[in-house]
Amino acid sequence: MSDGADCKCAAWNSSECGCDADWTPQETIDLRVENTSLLALLKEMSAEIEELTKALALEIRERVAAEQKIVEKDMEISKLKEGILLLREQLTNPRR
Ligand SMILES: [Zn+2]
C-alpha cells in the first residue's frame, strides 16, 4: 500500500496518522522499482561492454601479430627475389 491507502485512522497525511500506515507516494515506490531494474540493466550492460572490450583487445592483438607475420614473409620473399636476380645475373653473365 502507498499514499496512506491502508490508513485506518482517517488521517489526511502521515503527520496526522496514528495507525502506522504507509504514506510513501506511489510515484516514489514506482521510481524505486524502476531504479532497481535500471541498475540491474546497467550492471548487465557494463559486464557486456567489459567482455566485448576484452574480445576486441584480443582480436586486435591477433591481427597485429598476423600483420607482423605478413611483413616478415614479405621481407623473406624480397630477399629470395634478390637472390634469384643475382643468380640469374651470374648465369647470364658468367665471369671467368
Ligand atoms: Zn492512519
Image (cartoon, grey):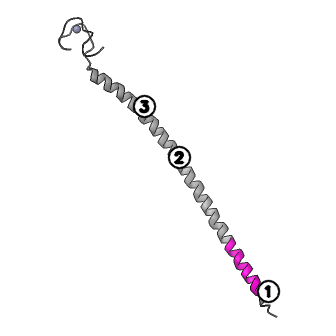
Question: In this rendering, which labeled residue sits more in front, label 2 or label 1?
Answer: 1
Query: Which quarter of the rendered picture does the C terminus lie within?
Result: bottom right
- Say few, some or many: other residues with alpha carbon within 10 Å of mark 1 (under 14 / 14 to 19 / 20 or more): few
- Label 3 sits on a secondary structure element that is helix
The residue at the point 58 percent across, 59 percent down is 64
Q: Which amino acid does the dot numbered 1 rest on? A: Leu
Please identify the quarter of the rendering in which residue 20 is found.
top left
The residue at the point 45 percent across, 39 percent down is 46
Extreme residue toward the top, this view? 9
Q: Which amino acid does the dot numbered 2 rest on? A: Lys
Decide which of tag 2 and tag 3 comes sooner along the chain: 3
- Label 1 sits on a secondary structure element that is helix
58 up-or-down from 20: above or below? below
Quarter of the rendered image showing ligand 1? top left
| Dominant secondary structure of the residues highlighted in magenta in the image | helix
Please give left or right for residue 14 compared with residue 75 in the image: left
For the residues bearing labels 2 and 1, Cβ distance under 8 angstroms: no
For the residues bearing labels 1 and 3, Cβ distance under 8 angstroms: no
Please give left or right for residue 42 compared with residue 63 in the image: left
For the residues bearing labels 2 and 3, Cβ distance under 8 angstroms: no
3D distance between C-alphas at marks 1 and 3: 76 Å
Q: Which residue matches tag 1?
A: 91
Region rendered in magenta: 77-91
**Residue 13: image x %, image y %?**
19, 14
The residue at the point 50 percent across, 47 percent down is 53
Decide which of tag 2 and tag 1 comes sooner along the chain: 2
Q: Which residue matches tag 3?
A: 40
- Say few, some or many: other residues with alpha carbon within 10 Å of mark 3 (under 14 / 14 to 19 / 20 or more): few
